[in-house]
Protein backbone atom coordinates (compact mmCIF):
# COMPACT_ATOMS: atom_id res chain seq x y z
CA UNK A 1 0.00 0.00 0.00
CA UNK A 2 1.27 3.48 -0.87
CA UNK A 3 1.83 6.07 1.86
CA UNK A 4 -0.76 8.22 0.10
CA UNK A 5 -3.40 5.52 0.45
CA UNK A 6 -2.60 4.91 4.11
CA UNK A 7 -2.90 8.66 4.77
CA UNK A 8 -6.25 8.70 2.98
CA UNK A 9 -7.43 6.00 5.38
CA UNK A 10 -6.21 8.07 8.35
CA UNK A 11 -8.50 10.99 7.50
CA UNK A 12 -11.49 10.16 9.74
CA UNK A 13 -9.21 10.13 12.78
CA UNK A 14 -7.41 13.32 11.71
CA UNK A 15 -10.72 15.08 11.19
CA UNK A 16 -12.01 14.04 14.59
CA UNK A 17 -8.78 15.22 16.24
CA UNK A 18 -8.98 18.59 14.48
CA UNK A 19 -12.59 19.10 15.48
CA UNK A 20 -12.10 18.10 19.11
CA UNK A 21 -8.82 19.91 19.75
CA UNK A 22 -9.49 23.15 17.86
CA UNK A 23 -13.19 23.70 18.62
CA UNK A 24 -12.80 26.01 21.63
CA UNK A 25 -10.00 27.99 20.00
CA UNK A 26 -12.02 28.57 16.83
CA UNK A 27 -14.96 29.86 18.87
CA UNK A 28 -12.63 32.33 20.62
CA UNK A 29 -11.16 33.45 17.29
CA UNK A 30 -14.65 33.97 15.88
CA UNK A 31 -15.64 36.07 18.90
CA UNK A 32 -12.60 38.30 18.37
CA UNK A 33 -13.32 38.61 14.65
CA UNK A 34 -16.93 39.62 15.29
CA UNK A 35 -15.82 42.31 17.73
CA UNK A 36 -13.44 43.74 15.10
CA UNK A 37 -16.20 44.73 12.66
CA UNK A 38 -14.71 42.68 9.83
CA UNK A 39 -16.13 43.78 6.46
CA UNK A 40 -13.99 41.63 4.16
CA UNK A 41 -12.18 38.29 4.33
CA UNK A 42 -9.16 37.64 2.10
CA UNK A 43 -7.77 34.10 1.67
CA UNK A 44 -4.19 33.46 0.57
CA UNK A 45 -2.72 30.07 -0.38
CA UNK A 46 -0.99 28.04 -3.09
CA UNK A 47 -1.50 24.57 -4.58
CA UNK A 48 -3.80 22.19 -2.73
CA UNK A 49 -4.22 24.76 0.05
CA UNK A 50 -5.49 27.20 -2.58
CA UNK A 51 -8.15 24.64 -3.48
CA UNK A 52 -9.16 24.52 0.18
CA UNK A 53 -9.31 28.32 0.14
CA UNK A 54 -11.64 28.20 -2.86
CA UNK A 55 -13.99 26.07 -0.79
CA UNK A 56 -13.56 28.51 2.08
CA UNK A 57 -14.65 31.37 -0.15
CA UNK A 58 -17.93 29.67 -1.08
CA UNK A 59 -18.62 28.51 2.45
CA UNK A 60 -17.82 31.76 4.27
CA UNK A 61 -19.85 33.90 1.90
CA UNK A 62 -22.74 31.45 2.05
CA UNK A 63 -22.85 31.22 5.84
CA UNK A 64 -21.66 34.63 7.06
CA UNK A 65 -22.67 37.08 4.33
CA UNK A 66 -19.19 38.64 4.48
CA UNK A 67 -17.57 39.15 1.05
CA UNK A 68 -14.55 36.89 0.53
CA UNK A 69 -11.69 37.39 -1.92
CA UNK A 70 -8.90 35.07 -3.02
CA UNK A 71 -5.58 36.90 -2.80
CA UNK A 72 -3.11 37.14 -5.70
CA UNK A 73 0.23 36.80 -3.84
CA UNK A 74 2.18 38.28 -6.76
CA UNK A 75 0.58 41.68 -6.07
CA UNK A 76 2.61 41.68 -2.85
CA UNK A 77 5.73 39.71 -3.82
CA UNK A 78 6.45 40.72 -7.43
CA UNK A 79 4.63 44.05 -7.79
CA UNK A 80 5.34 45.22 -4.22
CA UNK A 81 1.93 46.84 -3.77
CA UNK A 82 0.20 47.55 -0.47
CA UNK A 83 -3.56 47.35 -0.08
CA UNK A 84 -5.99 49.15 2.21
CA UNK A 85 -7.11 46.39 4.55
CA UNK A 86 -8.75 48.04 7.52
CA UNK A 87 -11.62 45.87 8.88
CA UNK A 88 -10.26 42.91 6.91
CA UNK A 89 -9.45 39.38 8.06
CA UNK A 90 -6.64 37.79 6.03
CA UNK A 91 -6.44 34.00 6.30
CA UNK A 92 -3.27 32.22 5.20
CA UNK A 93 -3.61 28.52 4.39
CA UNK A 94 -0.53 26.30 4.15
CA UNK A 95 0.13 22.67 5.02
CA UNK A 96 3.73 23.37 6.03
CA UNK A 97 3.35 26.99 7.10
CA UNK A 98 6.61 27.70 5.25
CA UNK A 99 5.33 29.09 1.95
CA UNK A 100 7.51 32.18 1.59
CA UNK A 101 5.08 34.15 -0.58
CA UNK A 102 2.10 33.36 1.65
CA UNK A 103 3.98 34.53 4.70
CA UNK A 104 5.10 37.73 2.96
CA UNK A 105 1.45 38.46 2.16
CA UNK A 106 0.42 37.91 5.80
CA UNK A 107 3.16 40.26 7.01
CA UNK A 108 2.24 42.95 4.45
CA UNK A 109 -1.45 42.67 5.25
CA UNK A 110 -0.82 43.05 8.96
CA UNK A 111 1.12 46.25 8.24
CA UNK A 112 -1.87 47.45 6.18
CA UNK A 113 -4.23 47.10 9.13
CA UNK A 114 -5.62 43.60 8.64
CA UNK A 115 -6.24 40.95 11.27
CA UNK A 116 -4.40 37.75 10.31
CA UNK A 117 -5.22 34.09 10.81
CA UNK A 118 -3.17 31.03 9.85
CA UNK A 119 -4.52 27.57 9.01
CA UNK A 120 -1.58 25.17 9.06
CA UNK A 121 -0.55 21.68 10.06
CA UNK A 122 2.53 22.89 11.94
CA UNK A 123 2.14 24.83 15.18
CA UNK A 124 5.80 25.94 15.18
CA UNK A 125 5.87 27.05 11.55
CA UNK A 126 6.82 30.53 10.35
CA UNK A 127 3.20 31.18 9.40
CA UNK A 128 1.94 30.37 12.88
CA UNK A 129 4.46 32.81 14.35
CA UNK A 130 3.49 35.60 11.93
CA UNK A 131 -0.30 35.39 12.24
CA UNK A 132 -2.35 36.91 15.04
CA UNK A 133 -4.18 33.60 15.52
CA UNK A 134 -3.71 30.05 14.28
CA UNK A 135 -5.95 27.06 13.64
CA UNK A 136 -3.90 23.86 13.66
CA UNK A 137 -5.02 21.04 11.38
CA UNK A 138 -4.42 17.92 13.43
CA UNK A 139 -3.47 15.69 10.50
CA UNK A 140 -0.20 14.49 11.98
CA UNK A 141 2.89 14.05 9.81
CA UNK A 142 1.97 13.80 6.13
CA UNK A 143 4.76 11.91 4.35
CA UNK A 144 3.29 11.55 0.89
CA UNK A 145 4.05 14.50 -1.39
CA UNK A 146 0.43 14.39 -2.57
CA UNK A 147 -1.59 16.09 0.16
CA UNK A 148 -4.75 14.29 1.27
CA UNK A 149 -5.44 14.46 4.99
CA UNK A 150 -4.08 18.01 5.28
CA UNK A 151 -6.52 19.10 2.54
CA UNK A 152 -9.58 17.62 4.23
CA UNK A 153 -8.50 19.00 7.60
CA UNK A 154 -8.18 22.44 5.99
CA UNK A 155 -11.72 22.07 4.67
CA UNK A 156 -12.83 21.19 8.20
CA UNK A 157 -11.02 24.24 9.59
CA UNK A 158 -13.08 26.39 7.22
CA UNK A 159 -16.23 24.55 8.27
CA UNK A 160 -15.43 25.33 11.90
CA UNK A 161 -14.58 28.97 11.25
CA UNK A 162 -17.72 29.51 9.16
CA UNK A 163 -19.97 27.90 11.76
CA UNK A 164 -18.37 29.86 14.58
CA UNK A 165 -18.76 33.15 12.68
CA UNK A 166 -22.40 32.49 11.77
CA UNK A 167 -24.54 30.80 14.43
CA UNK A 168 -21.76 29.43 16.65
CA UNK A 169 -23.12 25.88 16.35
CA UNK A 170 -20.36 23.42 15.48
CA UNK A 171 -22.39 20.36 16.46
CA UNK A 172 -23.47 19.41 12.89
CA UNK A 173 -19.77 19.10 11.99
CA UNK A 174 -19.37 16.13 14.34
CA UNK A 175 -20.96 13.96 11.62
CA UNK A 176 -18.13 14.63 9.16
CA UNK A 177 -15.60 12.06 10.49
CA UNK A 178 -18.26 9.33 10.22
CA UNK A 179 -19.16 10.41 6.69
CA UNK A 180 -15.44 10.34 5.87
CA UNK A 181 -15.13 6.81 7.26
CA UNK A 182 -17.94 5.62 5.01
CA UNK A 183 -16.19 7.16 2.01
CA UNK A 184 -12.95 5.39 2.93
CA UNK A 185 -15.04 2.21 2.77
CA UNK A 186 -15.42 2.75 -0.99
CA UNK A 187 -11.84 1.59 -1.54
CA UNK A 188 -12.78 -1.93 -2.63
CA UNK A 189 -15.45 -0.62 -5.02
CA UNK A 190 -12.95 1.74 -6.66
CA UNK A 191 -10.64 -1.26 -7.09
CA UNK A 192 -13.26 -2.81 -9.36
CA UNK A 193 -13.39 0.11 -11.80
CA UNK A 194 -9.85 1.51 -11.84
CA UNK A 195 -8.50 -0.81 -14.56
CA UNK A 196 -10.79 0.88 -17.08
CA UNK A 197 -8.74 4.06 -16.74
CA UNK A 198 -5.23 2.57 -16.94
CA UNK A 199 -4.45 4.31 -20.22
CA UNK A 200 -6.26 7.56 -19.51
CA UNK A 201 -3.97 10.51 -20.27
CA UNK A 202 -6.49 13.37 -20.27
CA UNK A 203 -9.87 14.16 -18.74
CA UNK A 204 -12.08 16.94 -17.43
CA UNK A 205 -13.32 17.25 -13.85
CA UNK A 206 -16.56 19.15 -13.28
CA UNK A 207 -18.45 20.37 -10.22
CA UNK A 208 -20.22 23.47 -9.01
CA UNK A 209 -20.82 25.44 -5.81
CA UNK A 210 -19.41 24.04 -2.59
CA UNK A 211 -17.78 21.12 -4.44
CA UNK A 212 -16.16 23.32 -7.12
CA UNK A 213 -12.94 23.27 -5.06
CA UNK A 214 -13.01 19.46 -5.26
CA UNK A 215 -12.91 19.66 -9.05
CA UNK A 216 -9.65 21.58 -8.68
CA UNK A 217 -8.34 19.16 -6.06
CA UNK A 218 -9.22 15.98 -7.98
CA UNK A 219 -7.62 17.53 -11.04
CA UNK A 220 -4.36 18.38 -9.26
CA UNK A 221 -4.21 14.88 -7.76
CA UNK A 222 -4.56 13.28 -11.21
CA UNK A 223 -1.88 15.58 -12.62
CA UNK A 224 0.68 15.17 -9.85
CA UNK A 225 0.30 11.45 -9.11
CA UNK A 226 -0.84 9.97 -12.45
CA UNK A 227 0.57 12.53 -14.93
CA UNK A 228 -2.89 12.87 -16.46
CA UNK A 229 -3.75 16.21 -18.09
CA UNK A 230 -6.87 17.06 -16.07
CA UNK A 231 -8.80 20.26 -16.74
CA UNK A 232 -11.30 21.45 -14.14
CA UNK A 233 -14.49 23.40 -14.70
CA UNK A 234 -17.62 24.70 -13.10
CA UNK A 235 -20.53 22.98 -14.84
CA UNK A 236 -21.87 26.43 -15.77
CA UNK A 237 -18.61 27.35 -17.49
CA UNK A 238 -18.23 23.93 -19.09
CA UNK A 239 -21.63 24.16 -20.78
CA UNK A 240 -20.66 27.57 -22.20
CA UNK A 241 -18.03 26.20 -24.56
CA UNK A 242 -15.54 23.58 -23.33
CA UNK A 243 -18.19 20.86 -23.67
CA UNK A 244 -17.22 20.90 -27.35
CA UNK A 245 -14.20 18.73 -26.49
CA UNK A 246 -16.43 15.81 -25.55
CA UNK A 247 -16.55 12.86 -27.89
CA UNK A 248 -16.90 9.09 -27.66
CA UNK A 249 -15.01 7.66 -24.66
CA UNK A 250 -13.63 11.04 -23.52
CA UNK A 251 -13.32 10.79 -19.69
CA UNK A 252 -15.46 13.18 -17.62
CA UNK A 253 -15.39 13.14 -13.80
CA UNK A 254 -18.45 14.65 -12.11
CA UNK A 255 -19.17 15.58 -8.48
CA UNK A 256 -22.96 15.55 -8.08
CA UNK A 257 -24.10 15.96 -4.46
CA UNK A 258 -27.73 16.61 -3.54
CA UNK A 259 -28.71 20.25 -3.33
CA UNK A 260 -29.01 23.29 -5.59
CA UNK A 261 -26.27 22.18 -8.00
CA UNK A 262 -27.73 18.75 -8.74
CA UNK A 263 -30.04 19.79 -11.60
CA UNK A 264 -27.13 21.44 -13.37
CA UNK A 265 -24.96 18.35 -12.95
CA UNK A 266 -27.82 16.10 -14.10
CA UNK A 267 -28.13 18.16 -17.29
CA UNK A 268 -24.41 17.74 -17.92
CA UNK A 269 -24.56 14.00 -17.22
CA UNK A 270 -27.35 13.61 -19.77
CA UNK A 271 -25.36 15.56 -22.36
CA UNK A 272 -22.26 13.47 -21.63
CA UNK A 273 -24.28 10.30 -22.18
CA UNK A 274 -25.71 11.63 -25.48
CA UNK A 275 -22.17 12.28 -26.71
CA UNK A 276 -21.04 8.77 -25.65
CA UNK A 277 -18.33 10.22 -23.43
CA UNK A 278 -17.07 8.17 -20.47
CA UNK A 279 -18.49 9.55 -17.22
CA UNK A 280 -17.35 8.75 -13.70
CA UNK A 281 -19.98 10.20 -11.36
CA UNK A 282 -19.55 10.62 -7.60
CA UNK A 283 -22.97 11.03 -5.98
CA UNK A 284 -25.47 9.61 -3.54
CA UNK A 285 -28.36 10.22 -5.95
CA UNK A 286 -29.68 7.19 -7.93
CA UNK A 287 -31.14 9.19 -10.83
CA UNK A 288 -27.83 10.75 -11.85
CA UNK A 289 -25.80 7.61 -11.08
CA UNK A 290 -27.91 5.76 -13.67
CA UNK A 291 -26.39 8.04 -16.31
CA UNK A 292 -22.80 7.15 -15.37
CA UNK A 293 -20.44 4.93 -17.29
CA UNK A 294 -18.94 4.16 -13.88
CA UNK A 295 -20.66 5.19 -10.65
CA UNK A 296 -19.21 5.85 -7.21
CA UNK A 297 -22.17 5.85 -4.85
CA UNK A 298 -21.66 7.86 -1.69
CA UNK A 299 -23.15 5.62 1.06
CA UNK A 300 -25.26 8.32 2.75
CA UNK A 301 -27.36 11.23 1.52
CA UNK A 302 -25.47 14.10 3.12
CA UNK A 303 -26.63 17.72 3.50
CA UNK A 304 -24.87 19.64 0.71
CA UNK A 305 -23.03 21.88 3.17
CA UNK A 306 -21.20 18.83 4.56
CA UNK A 307 -20.50 17.01 1.27
CA UNK A 308 -17.07 18.33 0.19
CA UNK A 309 -14.96 16.20 2.58
CA UNK A 310 -16.74 12.85 2.04
CA UNK A 311 -16.96 13.53 -1.71
CA UNK A 312 -13.25 14.22 -2.25
CA UNK A 313 -12.12 11.01 -0.49
CA UNK A 314 -13.19 8.59 -3.28
CA UNK A 315 -11.46 10.91 -5.75
CA UNK A 316 -8.27 10.72 -3.67
CA UNK A 317 -8.54 6.93 -3.62
CA UNK A 318 -9.09 6.92 -7.38
CA UNK A 319 -5.91 8.95 -7.97
CA UNK A 320 -3.81 6.75 -5.66
CA UNK A 321 -5.15 3.56 -7.26
CA UNK A 322 -4.74 4.87 -10.80
CA UNK A 323 -1.13 5.78 -10.12
CA UNK A 324 -0.56 2.21 -8.93
CA UNK A 325 -2.06 0.57 -12.04
CA UNK A 326 0.02 2.93 -14.20
CA UNK A 327 3.14 1.73 -12.37
CA UNK A 328 3.78 5.12 -10.75
CA UNK A 329 4.50 6.13 -7.16
CA UNK A 330 1.92 8.62 -5.86
CA UNK A 331 4.19 9.29 -2.88
CA UNK A 332 7.10 10.75 -4.85
CA UNK A 333 5.85 12.46 -8.03
CA UNK A 334 8.62 13.55 -10.36
CA UNK A 335 9.82 17.11 -9.93
CA UNK A 336 7.91 17.72 -6.70
CA UNK A 337 8.81 18.10 -3.04
CA UNK A 338 6.67 18.34 0.09
CA UNK A 339 7.43 22.01 0.73
CA UNK A 340 7.38 24.37 -2.27
CA UNK A 341 8.83 27.84 -1.75
CA UNK A 342 7.89 30.50 -4.29
CA UNK A 343 7.89 34.30 -4.43
Image (cartoon, rainbow, N blue to C red):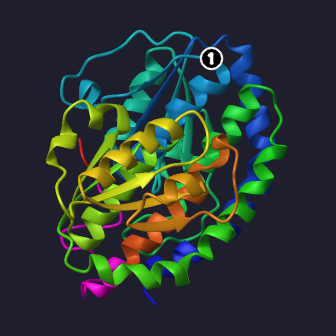
Residue drawn 33% across the image and 85% down it:
324
Displayed quadrant of residue 241: top left
Residue 124 appears in view: no
Residue nearest the viewer, comparing 147 with 317:
317
Where residue 91 sits in the image (x, y, percent)? Answer: 52, 33
Residue drawn 74% across the image and 49% down it:
22
**Span highlighted in magenta in the image:** 322-340
Horizontal side of 150 relative to 212 (left or right) equals right
Residue on which the image places disc 1 = 65
Which residue lies most toward the front here? 274
Residue drawn 65% across the image and 64% down it:
180
Residue nearest the viewer, comparing 27 with 76:
27
* Magenta highlight on residue 331: yes
Where residue 74 sits in the image (x, y, percent)? Answer: 24, 30
Q: Secondary structure at mark 1?
A: loop
Quarter holding the C terminus is top left
Compared with residue 177, is residue 50 higher up or lower down, i.e. above or below?
A: above
Residue nearest the viewer, comparing 289 with 116:
289
Horizontal side of 247 relative to 32 (left or right) equals left
Compared with residue 115, is residue 9 higher up or lower down, i.e. above or below?
A: below
* Magenta highlight on residue 227: no
Horizontal side of 65 relative to 220 (left or right) equals right
Q: Is the magenta region chiefly helix, strand or loop? A: loop
Displayed quadrant of residue 277: bottom left
Where residue 132 sits in the image (x, y, percent)? Answer: 60, 32
Compared with residue 106, is residue 126 higher up or lower down, i.e. above or below?
A: below
Horizontal side of 88 relative to 18 (left or right) equals left
Residue 290 appears in view: yes
Where residue 189 sits in the image (x, y, percent)? Answer: 52, 80
Q: Residues within 10 Å of mark 1 (few under 14, many from 20)?
A: few
Amino acid sequence: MSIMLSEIEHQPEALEQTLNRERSKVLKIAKAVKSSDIQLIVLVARGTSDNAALFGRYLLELTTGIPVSLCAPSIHTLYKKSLALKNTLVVGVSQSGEGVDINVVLENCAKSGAKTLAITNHAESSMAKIADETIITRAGVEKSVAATKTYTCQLLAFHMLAAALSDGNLEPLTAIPEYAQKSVGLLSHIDTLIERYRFMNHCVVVARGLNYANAYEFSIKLMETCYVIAERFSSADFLHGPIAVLQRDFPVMLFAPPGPTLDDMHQLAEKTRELHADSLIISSEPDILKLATKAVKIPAKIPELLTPIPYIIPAQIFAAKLAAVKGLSPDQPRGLSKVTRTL
